[in-house]
Image (cartoon, rainbow, N blue to C red):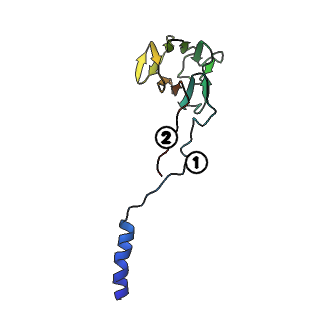
């Protein structure tokens, strides 16, 4: 019986201890959507919506976005206008312009008619959230 008394504190000590859990870097529940070849031109990456993970390279001076398949960036959802917005890549920067869409175009949480895009800007068009990137993102390693 005295053996049982000595076992209880050991078990309690073991369950009260702090344990460190590290998520494996190749965990499928947290996909690395940017694990692609480096890009030379700015891109738009869909991070939320029906086409999550799609990447569009902005290789033209003007890129149209909308629900109509004739757009360079085709977002197939009823929350997107047929010709929703246009992106202009100029030497002084990249801009997005809403083209009178029903649900509007949002940049970094604000509804806009026109806005300058910066590396990491988020764009909401209907149910889609896209992120604008000017250069390849750097991976930040965590843990040991």
User: How far across and down, in percent of the image, does residue 50 sit?
Assistant: 58, 31
Q: Nearer the viewer, residue 56 or 52?
A: 56
Residue 138 lies, with reference to residue 73, above or below; the image says below
Q: Name the residue under label 2.
A: 140
Q: Which of 93 and 12 is in front in this view?
A: 93
Q: Mark 1 points at which residue?
A: 26
Q: Residues within 10 Å of mark 1 (few under 14, many from 20)?
A: few
Say which residue appears at 43% left-offset and 15% top-offset.
Answer: 112
Residue 136's quadrant in the figure? Answer: top right
User: How far across and down, in percent of the image, does residue 114 sit?
Assistant: 46, 12
In this view, the residue farthest toward the right is 70
Between disc 1 and disc 2, the foreground one is 2
Is any atom of residue 104 visible in this view? no
Q: What is the CA distance from the residue labelled 1 to the residue labelled 2?
A: 14 Å
Q: What is the secondary structure assignment of the residue under circle 2?
A: loop
Say which residue appears at 50% left-offset and 44% top-offset.
Answer: 141
Residue 113's quadrant in the figure? Answer: top left
**Count of marks, rendered view:** 2
Q: In which quarter of the image is the N terminus?
A: bottom left
User: How far across and down, in percent of the image, does residue 79 sit?
Assistant: 52, 22
User: How far across and down, in percent of the image, does residue 86 sit?
Assistant: 55, 13
């Amino acid at each position: 019986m005295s053996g049982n008394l000595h076992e209880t504190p050991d078990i309690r000590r073991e369950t009260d201890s702090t344990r460190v859990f590290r998520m494996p870097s190749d965990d499928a529940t947290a996909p690395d959507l940017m694990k692609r070849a480096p890009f030379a031109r700015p891109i738009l990456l869909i991070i939320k919506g029906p086409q999550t993970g799609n990447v569009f390279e902005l290789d033209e001076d003007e890129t149209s976005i909308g629900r109509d398949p004739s757009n360079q960036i085709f977002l197939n959802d009823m929350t997107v206008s047929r010709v929703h917005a246009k992106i202009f890549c100029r030497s002084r920067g990249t801009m997005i312009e809403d083209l009178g869409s029903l649900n509007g175009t949002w940049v970094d949480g604000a509804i806009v008619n026109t806005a300058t895009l910066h590396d990491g800007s988020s764009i909401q068009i209907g149910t889609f959230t896209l992120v604008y990137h000017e250069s390849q993102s750097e991976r930040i390693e965590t843990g040991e």
